[in-house]
Amino acid sequence: MSNSTPKQPQNGANGDTPLTAQNAEIIQLSRKDFVSDQEVRWCPGCGDYSILAQTQKVMPDFGYPKEKIVFISGIGCSGRLPYYMNTYGFHTIHGRAPTLATGLKAARPDLMVWVITGDGDALSIGGNHVLHSMRRNVDLKMVMFNNRIYGLTKGQASPTSEFGKRTKSTPAGTIDTPIQPLTVALAAEASFVARSVDTHTEHLQQTLNRAGYHKGSAFIEVLQNCNIFNDGAWRDFTDREVRDDRMLVLEHGKPMIFGKDRNKGIRLRGLCPEVVQLGENGVTESDLLVHDEQADEPYLALVLSRMFWPEFPVPVGVFRAVPRPTHDELIVQQLAAAVASGGEGNLETLLRSGETWTVS
Amino acid sequence: MTATKERRVPTQELERVTIRFAGDSGDGMQLTGGQFTRTAAVFGNDISTLPDFPAEIRAPAGSLPGVSGFQISFSSADIHTPGDEPDVLVAMNPAALKTNVQDLPAGGALIVNSDAFTQQNLNKAAYASNPLTDGTLKQYTVFEIPISTLNERSLEGLDMTSKQKDLTKNFFALGIMFWLYERSMDPTIRWIDGKFKARPVIAEANTRALKAGYAFGETTEIFHTHYRVAPAKLPPGTYRNITGNEATALGFLTASKLADRPLFYGSYPITPASDILHQLSGYKSFGVKTFQAEDEIAAIGAAIGASYGGALGMTASSGPGIALKSEALGLAVMVELPLVVIDVQRAGPSTGMPTKTEQADLLQVMFGRNSDSPIPVVAPATPGECFDLAIEAVRIALKYVTPVVYLSDAFLATGAEPWKIPALSDLESIAVENWTEASTFHPYDRDPQTLARKWAVPGTPGLEHRIGGLEKADITGNVSYDPDNHHRMQILRREKVAGIAADIPPLDVFGAASGDLLILGWGSTYGAIRSAVERLQAQGRSVAHAHLRHLNPFPRNLGDVLGSYRRVLIPEVNLGQLSLLVRGRFLVDAIGYNRVRGKPFRISEIETEAERILDDIE
């Protein structure tokens, strides 16, 4: 997989060039159009502010009029986001946002549907729905705010909290092994999987833009800081001074090189990745893994999804983006096929089907 | 059919006959009963059926838990129930005999497959001695027929294993019954031809088995009479045979057309509701979208999502699944979106007895949510009525922009009756417009008449707004923690549902408008109550029957009706749920009659209880 020549990205862009809508000249909207009249009520300094701002910034990219965009959320701090978007919005119940999005998209394929969720909402109470909405390839863009903590309930361990983490509910340290959200999404057959960081605003915009243009289930993990209950959750590798050495920015078709001096890379040894120094022990660029977000099988993406600080630089960007028929398309196809083979249903005939008899 | 040895057998006219087919769950008893039902229905009898099968798909062959039964009552008069007890019991093996013979009255006819009474099968049914020879069946008219042997002989020459041949013996038994009750084999032969089109050998075997059974009745001298049950004098019209689940599916499809809203049906498989999903998933050419969800919560979540998008969102389950849907149902109350939730009730609590009937989810659907969370509830009384109440549920959901619960049960779902097919032109449109006017839009602004909020769907320009489970400010729909606003909203939600009482028919009473005893029922107890009341009225007793189709809100005259009788009896297949509501609401000292045996009431049970109360008054 590492040496195959990657296909071109499906949208004609590779993550560093924002896309623009084909009909952008018809619908000219700006960030302001997507700001609702509601006062934003997250804690000052919360990473959610940046995610909201980047989301509002990229919305005009897609060429959808705002009445055709719907934000659906579950419960948790992230769940408030729809109130702040001047689109249609539905703040649902804990963990169930993907189910409402599935029904909405099935009923209304014309809408652009975003799901806003958190690590507890998506991976704990709503884990089943994430799994199934991804495997069905429901055309929704799921943005999961991962702060490794339950914030709205004031600081309990979440499914992504590190092993041994002491919280209000785990004073002796959590004994649950955390899960990697992207590994889960890939295992669930998500057709678009990406990661970004709340404070890396440009990268976050690019990632949301790519997700918005993806047709099918998009799962975007946003590493987000909860400055009240889990401050500095990601700081060890996201801070400006260290990020270049501790993060790996994935680019389709490019070798996996990172580091301030662009002198480190990722090589595959057997089934496991390893960090190598370019120029040392005869290692050259040609030894490195080349990113391919469109590989038929998600092996490479799965390997990347397991790489994490401090053993590895943390990969960000688009892990996987493959075309697959969407749930709503398949539903509509089956309806059309039924009409094509037997004509449009006739209710009068249906009611009178089977054996009938007449009493006079 | 013309047999080689024609013999003259006298025919006796009967008004009503009840037959129970019982056998192993692999013996095809449901199919046999279903075919007899179709034939009787097409002939023009009034019919009522009670399938009774185990939850196990194939319990060990010949075992007591593996017995599957199907009772059909057919009549030349108007009937309401599948009969208290069978006149004829067809028992295909010892286990079927053992579990059913106690329901057969003395003198009843018992047809047994004597081939199945082997020592091994007798052991499985825990018979110490063979009931066919030990004299225990002497109060019945027993017809011992070696059905397996005779059937196998009739299939000689067909390229099938003996096991495959044995699987057709139910058609032999059906053939005997067709001869005994002078029924045409044609509808069943047509059905076999259609069903086994791709497998001509199987079609041939089943047809031969059926004809051989018929010929057996005709030519052997074991039966001395056959019986005729004349067609019933049903109101003029075109009829078909229908089960409650079939009528439910057709009713909701029809409602979606009357409402001009595409039907979206999210469901998770559960007995006895799954057949509705199966049926609706076949209506793709009508634009029906069905969604088999990953769980009960996803099923209702998707339905709410579809409703939010302007479709007719629906979901269905049985008691355990309704419990799982409760939180989402509360969300539907809070966001005030139309939604229909079907609950095909079964015996509980927990997994309970999945294939057996009960009507014990009434309080769950009324109150099984956090806080005060009012939801309209409707309940059909007969299989055919499932169609009408489906339309009524959708009418209320759309007009009042509210979730509605539709309470069916296992007896209604699988039971069948003749159904007069309605003319579509007689059905009223229930179309409701969405709000599109931006200048006057507030998401929680209400229609002053119905109190329905202004329902605007995504895609409507200028009406972008946010809804959700958090309490909303009256009119503006902004998130609100204002104490007075919450109180006002709770009252508004309650008043909206209560106000529907002005928009539903008053409760109809069968019998005198006042008197000694009113029997008040709801749901599938209709048939047994009505039959009991007819018998008692014929004896001159002062009894009336009223049957609720709307359980929330109640019809506006219910209090007056209750007050017009000296006693009120409420029979329910639960431990007193409607009784609790009626007592709480009207302070009426209603008497409960409650039996939860997984079976519908018998007419005689209601009759006896009513007589006891009447005798007490006098």
Image: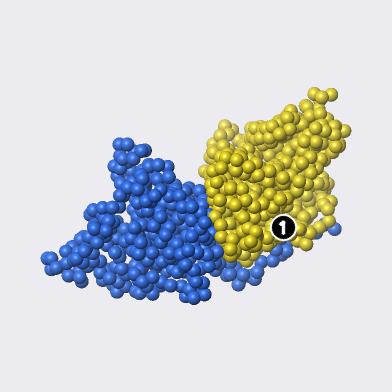
Q: Secondary structure at mark 1?
A: loop
Q: Chain of mark 1?
A: B
Q: Which residue is mark 1?
A: B430
The shade of chain A is: blue
Residue that appears at 45% across and 69% down: A61
Image spot of residue B280 (x, y percent): 62, 58
Name the residue furthest right: B540
Image spot of residue A113 (x, y percent): 50, 61
Query: Viewer-proximal residue, B170 or B389?
Result: B389
The three-letter amino acid code for the residue at tag 1 is Ile
Colour pattern of the rendering: by chain
**Image quadrant where residue A109 sits:** bottom right
Residue that appears at 84% across and 24% down: B618
Q: Height in image: B478 above or below B573? A: below
Image spot of residue A48 (x, y percent): 40, 54
Residue that appears at 54% across and 68% down: A333
The shade of chain B is: yellow
Give the side of residue A347 with respect to residue B60, left or right.
Answer: right
Neighbour tally class for label 1: few under 14, some 14-19, many 20 plus, Cα within 10 Å: many
Image spot of residue B184 (x, y percent): 75, 57
Residue B42 visible in rendering: no
**Image quadrant where residue B347 sits:** top right
Quadrant in which the N terminus of chain B appears: bottom right
Residue that appears at 69% across and 58% down: B432
Give the side of residue B249 with respect to residue A119, left or right.
Answer: right
Q: Height in image: B552 above or below A34? A: above
Give the side of residue B347 with respect to residue B605, left or right.
Answer: left
